[in-house]
Image (cartoon, rainbow, N blue to C red):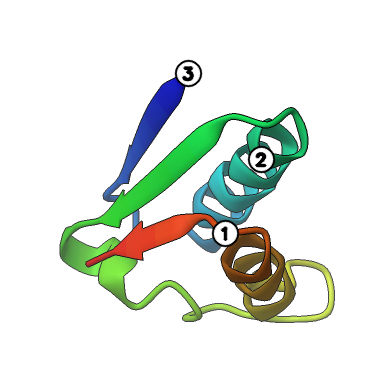
């Protein structure tokens, strides 16, 4: 199934959870595209040890997910 996640939130925890969900779907052989809109375009803003946004984005990209902004 093809799945599109549209992320607009400036909240780092919301973006982190969306990336984790996208990675879960990719692990289940789904076709996932993430569209970052508005403040979410700065997807690494708020990156910290507890919310490792860069690592989740890296896993997403290496798992053949599509990231659009």
* 3D distance between C-alphas at marks 1 and 2: 8 Å
Q: Earlier in the sequence, mark 1 or mark 3?
A: 3
Picture residue at 73% right of the left edge, 75% below the top: 55
Res 2 quadrant in image: top left
Residue 26 disc label? 2
Q: Earlier in the sequence, mark 2 or mark 3?
A: 3
Left-right relation of 9 to 53: left
Left-right relation of 38 to 19: left
Query: Callout 2: few (<14), some (14-19), or many (20+) C-alpha neighbours within 10 Å?
Result: some
Q: Earlier in the sequence, mark 1 or mark 2?
A: 2
- Residue position for label 1: 64
Badge 1 element = loop
Is there a contact, CB below 8 Å, between mark 1 and mark 2?
yes
Q: Which quadrant of the rendered structure holds the C terminus? A: bottom left
Picture residue at 67% right of the left edge, 59% below the top: 63
Q: Nearer the viewer, residue 32 or 50?
A: 32
Pinpoint residue 16: horizontal percent, then vertical percent. Answer: 62, 55
Badge 3 element = loop
């Amino acid at each position: 199934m093809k799945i599109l996640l549209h992320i607009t939130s400036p909240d780092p925890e919301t973006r982190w959870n969306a990336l984790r969900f996208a990675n879960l779907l990719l692990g289940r052989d789904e076709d996932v595209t993430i569209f970052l809109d508005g403040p979410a375009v700065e997807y690494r803003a708020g990156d910290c040890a507890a919310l490792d946004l860069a690592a989740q984005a890296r896993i997403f990209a290496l798992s053949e997910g599509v990231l659009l902004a």
